[in-house]
Amino acid sequence: MTTIEDQIKELTAYTKQELIKLELLDKATIKRKIHSSIFNLKGDQKLYTYLKDHDIITAFRGEGIRVSMHFYNTIEDIENFLKVIYQYRKL
């Protein structure tokens, strides 16, 4: 269990840093020293659909897009997710 928890914490910390750079997190989330593996991104239906079209599973909730890391995710998964967001921004 510790190995799984450590992996999720590592992925979460990395993802949070990158999402801050992309300005996709709200101020309250940014200020948290410890955060769960679930993030609610600033995003709309268009971004949600773009992520879905690129095989990235998220949930469109209220005024944002929910993403989360799990034990089966890898750093490569997160990097692919970020790459897709950067591609979206170039449209």
Image (cartoon, rainbow, N blue to C red):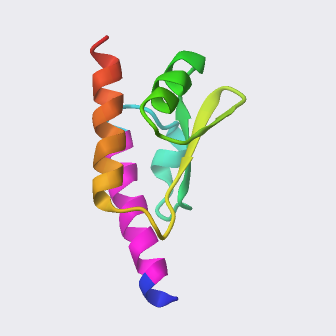
Q: Is residue 1 magenta?
A: no
Q: Residue furthest bottom?
A: 2
- Residue 28 percent location from the top left of the image: 56, 44
Residue at 41 percent across and 79 percent down: it is 6
**Residue 53 at least partly seen:** yes
Q: Residue furthest top?
A: 91
From this view, report whether residue 2 is shown above or below residue 10: below
From this view, report whether residue 57 is shown above or below residue 69: above
Residue at 47 percent across and 30 percent down: it is 51
Q: Which residues are magenta?
A: 4-19
Q: In which quadrant will I find the C terminus? A: top left
**Residue 43 at least partly seen:** no
Residue at 33 percent across and 57 percent down: it is 14
Q: Residue furthest right?
A: 62
- Side (left or right) of 71 relative to 82: right
- Residue 20 percent location from the top left of the image: 37, 41
- Side (left or right) of 76 relative to 23: left
* Count of number-bearing discs: 0
From this view, report whether residue 36 is shown above or below residue 17: below
Residue at 47 percent across and 89 percent down: it is 2
Quick one: 68 or 49, which is closer to the camera? 49
- Residue 4 percent location from the top left of the image: 47, 80
Magenta region, mostly helix, strand or loop?
helix
Quick one: 35 or 47, which is closer to the camera? 47
- Residue 78 percent location from the top left of the image: 35, 51
From this view, report whether residue 35 is shown above or below residue 25: below
Q: Is residue 10 magenta?
A: yes
Quick one: 28 or 25, which is closer to the camera? 25
